Image: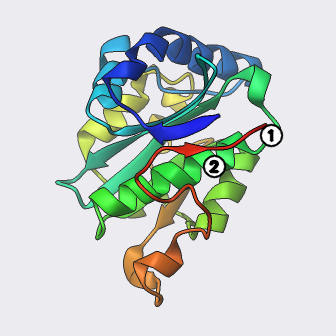
Amino acid sequence: MKIEISSSVHIMYVSEIQQEMYDSAQRRGTGIAKRSIEYLSKKITEGNAVIATDKGKWVGFCYIETWSHGQFVANSGLIVSPDFRHLGVATLIKEKVFALSRNKYPTAKIFGLTTGLAVMKINSDLGYKPVIYSELTQDEEFWNGCRSCVNYDILMKKERKNCLCTAMLFVPENIKNSAENVQPENRYNNEQESSFSV
């Protein structure tokens, strides 16, 4: 299996990725902001995503987005194909996309919103802390992305102070060690293509 930074060669997987994002949210009964084929395609071609593949099949995916003029970076859209779940793939993808975020935007705060306990655990292991929503970007475009979520009415009724998602934030200044020590110690952190067998 390869875990690598995306490029235009991965566009062929975009429809399957988008559909699995939607289907997975439906199965879990949780909200998820929908992303268009065009939006995901742009992330892939710009190298702002990490994709895992195995023998021509997509295995997993996650992308980055910047907000507030690069002060915040979100790692979003983490999804693993049902055939490859419970093998540790999500952790490897999150580690790689976290490293990509740190390399591209070393001073940015990295955040995520999730309803998934497994993602919360991965984020915690990377150094994220649970925070209140006011500590996240206040960029209107980010919050507009929640409009397609089934829980958007809850978010608005709570005046964007909380919702069903847990907010988590990584703040580089809070880490005393060097950037190399912040990143998990494994071979998936470098910018090169990574491989492993499942």
Kindly identify the residue that appears in the image at 48 percent across and 26 percent down: 33
Q: Residue at x 43, y 50 (%)?
A: 192
Amino acid at the residue labelled 1: Leu
Q: CA distance from mark 1 to mark 2?
A: 10 Å
Q: Position of residue 187 (x, y in %)?
A: 58, 60
Instruction: Name the residue: 56% across, 22% down.
Output: 150
Q: Is residue 170 left or right of residue 119?
A: left
What amino acid is found at the position of numbered circle 2 in the picture?
A: Leu
At mark 2, the secondary structure is helix
Asked if disc 1 and disc 2 are in contact, CB closer than 8 Å, the reply is no
Which quarter of the figure is the C terminus placed in? top right
Is residue 90 positioned above or below 178 on the image?
above
The residue under label 1 is 87
- Most extreme residue toward the left is 69
Residue 126: horizontal and vertical position, in percent? 59, 65
Residue wearing tag 2: 92
